[in-house]
Image (spheres, helix red, strand yellow):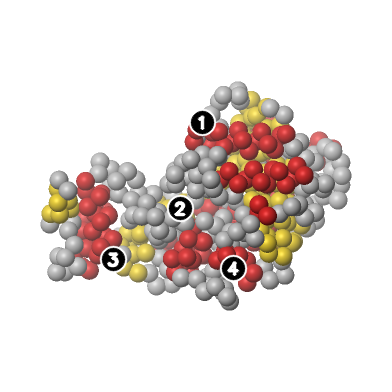
Amino acid sequence: MSESPLPPALNGKRHRGEPLSVCGLFAGIGGIEEGLRIAGHEVRVLCEIDPAARNVLKARFSRTRIAGDVTSLSTLPRTDIISAGFPCQDLSQAGKTNGIDGPKSSVVATLFALVAASRYKPKWVILENVPFMLRLDKGRAMHFLTKHLESLGYMWAYRLIDSRAFGLPQRRLRVILLASMREDPRSVLFSDDAAARSSKRCNGPSAYGFYWTEGNNGLGWAEDAVPTLKGGSSFGIPCPPGIWVCKDRSIVTPDVRDAERLQGFPADWTATTEDLPLSRRARWRLVGNAVSVPVTAWLGGRLAEPGCFDVSSASKLSADAPWPTACWGEKGKRFAVAVSSWPVRKKRRKLLDFLRFPTRLLSARATSGFLCRARESTLNFVDGFLDDVAHHLRVIDPDGKYPERFTNGRAKK
């Protein structure tokens, strides 16, 4: 591989199609690394503290070294790529919003310490996390990440990417941050753009996804898709989203095997754990915390085959400007880039056509709780939605055990 100090866009040289070696930190169930493997790269080391996730990795990456807590590492292996979907609990809008200094998300500092201490600096660093960190604490997390990358000598670029661009009926936006000392991350992240268009069809959506655990302030609403799959919920446990099936007025939840597919994994990716069988709830948690595989498969393909970056699409940002949805920077400078969250546009099936496994009817208790919260909220809903939720409740609770609304804290039918 070339050791030129200049990125390909500057030295005129490209090294296409060469497989890169990968070390995945905070690997979860391997969403980033599976995508890179699909793109032809070699996953050599995976590090994950969660024993349940680690057992999935052992089953799915049987020839890869699997390590535990990243804080126990004394040094990094010599690899081309360090990938890290570091914990999002402190950066997520649905979490505790403690920020980058929170007890979970702050562990990313360990990565920078390991890179700083490494004799052989990785050619590429890939970081992934939730989009809310662009706004939380005036983007303090992004200042933290980019400052550390620059102090290590890395040029960086990031882009907000939507999983729906890859044909998945899941509205999932994530920040992909890519950095390199010797290559140009802009030619990887920004060379493709297929700007999103309205998904509305003349006959309208056949289903809507939402979170039945919400209802007070939001729903995570999605047309012919599910909202972002999550590892937790406002109830403190991982829960599947609800799906409003317009045709029969039912409210259902998807099977966890379809949740795996909605993340781009094969069905039953989390099922094979020899010494630690996983419950359905545990599998939902792992799947909800994962990275969508097609996103990183695209990224891995572009790492092997960089494209072209249009410099005219970038504009300089002041130090105190809000973080945009796409940006690059180096040595204290940053530039906004005019690209969408859809690098490609794969054909996407309607949600009900995508689902392969039997759905479950949302329980009367869960339906009643959601309906009560929704009716007491100030949210606006699609015409007919709450009527159909109430219809669903009456069908599955014909004896009227569960209420349809609360008034002044008391149940009212």
Name which residue lies at 57% across and 37% down: 141
Mark 2: secondary structure: loop
State the CA–CA distance, disc 1 to disc 2.
23 Å
State the CA–CA distance, disc 4 to disc 1.
36 Å
Position of the C terminus by quadrant:
bottom left
> Dot 2 corresponds to which residue?
228
Q: Earlier in the sequence, mark 4 or mark 2?
A: 4
Q: Nearer the viewer, residue 4 or 102?
A: 102
Please indicate whether residue 298 sits to the left or right of residue 363 in the image: right
Q: Which mark is residue 138?
A: 1
Front tag of 2 and 3: 3
> Dot 4 corresponds to which residue?
56
Tell me the kind of residue under disc 2: Thr
Please indicate whether residue 200 sits to the left or right of residue 167 in the image: left
State the CA–CA distance, disc 4 to disc 2.
22 Å
> Dot 3 corresponds to which residue?
363
